[in-house]
Image (cartoon, rainbow, N blue to C red):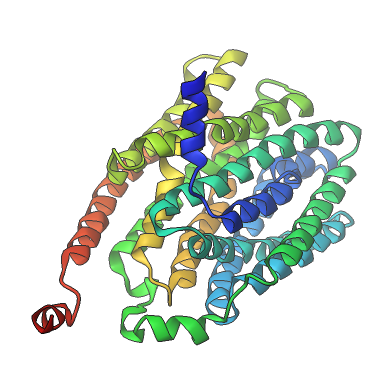
Amino acid sequence: MKKIVLLYRNAFGGLSRPAWMMSLVMLINRSGAMVTPFLSVYLTEVLDYSLKEAGIVLSMYGLGSVCGSFLGGWLTDKVGHFKVQFLSLTVGGSLYFVLLSLRQFEALMAGVFILSLVNDTLRPANSSSIASYARPENVTRAFSLNRMAINLGFSIGPALGGLLAAISYRWLFIADGLTCILAGLFFFFYFRNLQGQPPQQTVNAIEPKANARSPYSDGYFVLFAILCCCFATIFFQLLSTLPLYYRQVYTLSENKIGLLLGLNGLIVFLLEMILVYLIGDRVRKSWLIAGGVLVLGLSFVLLNLTQHLAILVVAMLLLSVAEILAMPFMATITVERSGLANRGSYMGLYTISYAAAHVVAPYLGTTLAATYGFATLWWCTGALSVVTAVGLYFVVQHIEKERVRKRNLPTPGAETMAVAQ
């Protein structure tokens, strides 16, 4: 028992106080994450839209996420991560109350798009702030801490959401909106004196503009982002088609669906920090990320091999392990590839890759499920995971080799200084 306690203490040790507070903000925010996991069920069962129509609305959420991620990355570099996060949390929370009253299909599409756009300006700003508050030697663990908080919130949100949905779906929107606003207020009062100077006043004095290249001109990183989008397209079946699969194939109640989805967050919360601490510096990122993608594909293929309630739990366990192996190291690759002057833009492109998957995943998933059945959908996700894993292995390996090569190059002027000394 002492060894286990020591292991946890070492895994969490050395992280800065602002990194902990940022994770607390995300915990408050994600504890109210109830609308998104149940949105497909809400659209099909409460508002009586077809499976394909629900997929279109969910794709509008993804389209808003793409625009929000791009806007958030741009704004972060312009005005700083503090203002972007505060406005995203408070304004986004207010929009849930507006979405609650929408019933017409076109109005729902517009409402979901605007809600997602505002909410997802948070992502690049949040990632940039984590990188700035974390100590250089534990950036990956700082991201893992933040993800741990998000996943703990996600284990609470869907489980509580399932209980509220059994009473009325109205409470999902109210709870989600209130927790966003509360997270925004907590964030404002704690970080208002820690926001620092706008990027132009600090970064340009430290890092030459020549080094601040655009991520869109970085060919290997663009390819990395595309492959991350493929990974996320598979992963986001968790939020779009998987709840429908539970409902239509296994006829599970909202409570049980919420518990299964919450299991993902609970597993990641319990294991991610420990696994990152144990293997993060011992195994190459290319192996970890590629392995995570393959395990993700296996978690969906497993659903086709047998039909039993126990297989749903095993599949969710594998999906959670895949998330732990891939996602924190993908974020670290992005941080290491960027510099101070362009971190917001790099994080913006990285989050755009996930946001784009929010567009593709629900529409593609619901279309395949409606046309060919869920079994075909799960086989397709398995095949895509193999292709994505191979691609990520080689791209990440190249990026890592390039980083090591640049790190070993002599600093300009270093030889002159050495001679002078």
Q: Which residue is nearer to you in this view: 23 or 194?
A: 194
Residue 65 position, x and y percent, is 61, 61
Task: Give the residue drawn at x 58%, y 20%.
Answer: 313
Q: Which residue is nearer to you in this view: 13 or 356?
A: 13
Residue 29 position, x and y percent, is 72, 51
**Whether residue 377 can be seen here:** no
The quarter of the displayed image where residue 285 is located: top left
Task: Give the residue drawn at x 51%, y 62%.
Answer: 352
Task: Give the residue drawn at x 39%, y 81%.
Answer: 206
Left or right: 43 as drawn, with respect to 381? right
Q: Quadrant of the C terminus?
A: bottom left
Task: Give the residue drawn at x 27%, y 45%.
Answer: 393
Residue 23 position, x and y percent, is 62, 51
- Residue 419's place in the image compared with 334, above or below, is below
Left or right: 89 as drawn, with respect to 408? right
- Residue 108's place in the image compared with 208, above or below, is above
Left or right: 408 as drawn, with respect to 164? left
**Whether residue 133 can be seen here:** yes
